[in-house]
Amino acid sequence: MANQPAHKFKIGLTTATVWQNDGFYSVDLSRSYKTDTGEWRNTGSFHHSDLLNLAKCAERAEIWIGLQISAK
């Protein structure tokens, strides 16, 4: 079975995926888009209109990680 993310934050087409890795957390930032054939894909490249949502996702991930660490 594949690793499951610890948490995900999604705003619009942007997502911050939080992973727990041997006692620390990492965050993958991505944007979803639809191909010409209608298939959904993800990319790490962002349009300027994505940046505010991306920043909000990253901030929510940072707060969530901080709460997980302080709860230990």
Image (cartoon, grey):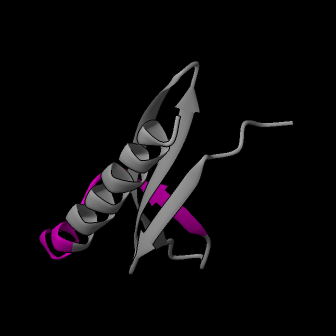
Q: Is residue 46 magenta?
A: yes
Q: Is residue 47 magenta?
A: yes
Outermost residue to the right: 1
Determine the image quadrant of residue 39: bottom right
Q: Is residue 27 above or below residue 45?
A: above
Q: Quadrant of the N terminus?
A: top right
Outermost residue to the front: 71
Q: Residue at x 23, y 71 (%)?
A: 50
Q: Is residue 5 above or below residue 40?
A: above
Q: Residue at x 25, y 68 (%)?
A: 56
Q: Is residue 69 above or below residue 51?
A: above
Determine the image quadrant of residue 37: bottom right
Q: Position of residue 47 (x, y in %)?
A: 19, 67
Outermost residue to the top: 22
**Is residue 28 visible to the viewer in this orientation of the structure?**
no
Viewer-nearest residue: 49 or 58: 58
Q: Residue at x 53, y 21 (%)?
A: 23
Residue stretch in magenta: 40-52
**Is residue 37 visible to the viewer in this orientation of the structure?**
yes
Viewer-nearest residue: 32 or 16: 16
Q: Position of residue 38 (x, y in %)?
A: 60, 79
Q: Residue at x 56, y 33 (%)?
A: 20
Q: Position of residue 30 (x, y in %)?
A: 39, 55
Q: Is residue 26 above or below residue 60?
A: above
Determine the image quadrant of residue 31: bottom left
